[in-house]
Image (spheres, helix red, strand yellow):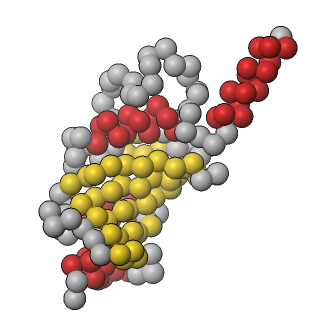
Amino acid sequence: MSEEEKIQQGLSEKFPFLKDKIRIQRPRRMYAEVSRENFFDVFDYAVIELGFPMLSAITGLDEGENLSFIYHLATESGVILNLKTAVAKEKPVLNTVTGYFFGAEIYERELVDLLGVKVEGLKKGKRYPLPDDWPDGQYPLRKDWKKEMLKGQEADKNG
């Protein structure tokens, strides 16, 4: 049994609701979709019990009505587990993972600035990557942002 299959089996046994939601995409690449309600239990188990001691990145996606987030976790041997969860776009709230990975702060600040997510537990700090004078409520990685910006520019020209 491969390392990926052992991880898949461990996750499925601990969390039966994941049985059909874990894929081995190719050697050393795994993908699992987890509801927001179950995310931290699965995340904690992967990090602590299954030996994923590295956070490679957090990717944020605008998927229409939801914002999705993929946490890219890695083992020492190079297996990457991509844990995906989603929140409603109208009120996007996540909990910080800086208690597990101090370096997650930079990724979480990007999610705040670029997608408008509230990350509960994230320490106050400087904006990143947008400048401090960037307008509030403007999130450039949201699909509707460019349309809103163009409408505003058009209104300025005609105004």
What residue occupies the far bottom of the structure in this picture?
1
Q: Say left or right for 57 vs 62.
A: left
What residue occupies the far top of the structure in this picture?
159
What residue occupies the far front of the structure in this picture?
27
Q: Quadrant of the N terminus?
A: bottom left
In this view, the residue in front, 45 or 145, is: 145
Depicted 11 relative to depicted 43: above or below: below
Q: Is residue 14 visible?
A: no
In this view, the residue in front, 1 or 34, is: 1
Q: Say left or right for 99 vs 39.
A: left
What residue occupies the far left of the structure in this picture?
76
**Residue 133 spot, x, y in % from top left:** 49, 14
Depicted 91 relative to depicted 153: above or below: below
Residue drawn at x 33%, y 69% as measured from the top left:
29
Q: Quadrant of the C terminus?
A: top right
Residue drawn at x 45%, y 81% as measured from the top left:
20
Residue drawn at x 35%, y 40% as measured from the top left:
107
Residue 123 image-quadrant placement: top left
Residue drawn at x 33%, y 57% as measured from the top left:
72
In this view, the residue in front, 79 or 108, is: 79
Q: Is residue 19 visible?
A: yes
**Residue 149 spot, x, y in % from top left:** 68, 27
Q: Report the number of discs.
A: 0
Depicted 31 relative to depicted 6: above or below: above
Residue 110 image-quadrant placement: top left
**Residue 156 spot, x, y in % from top left:** 77, 14
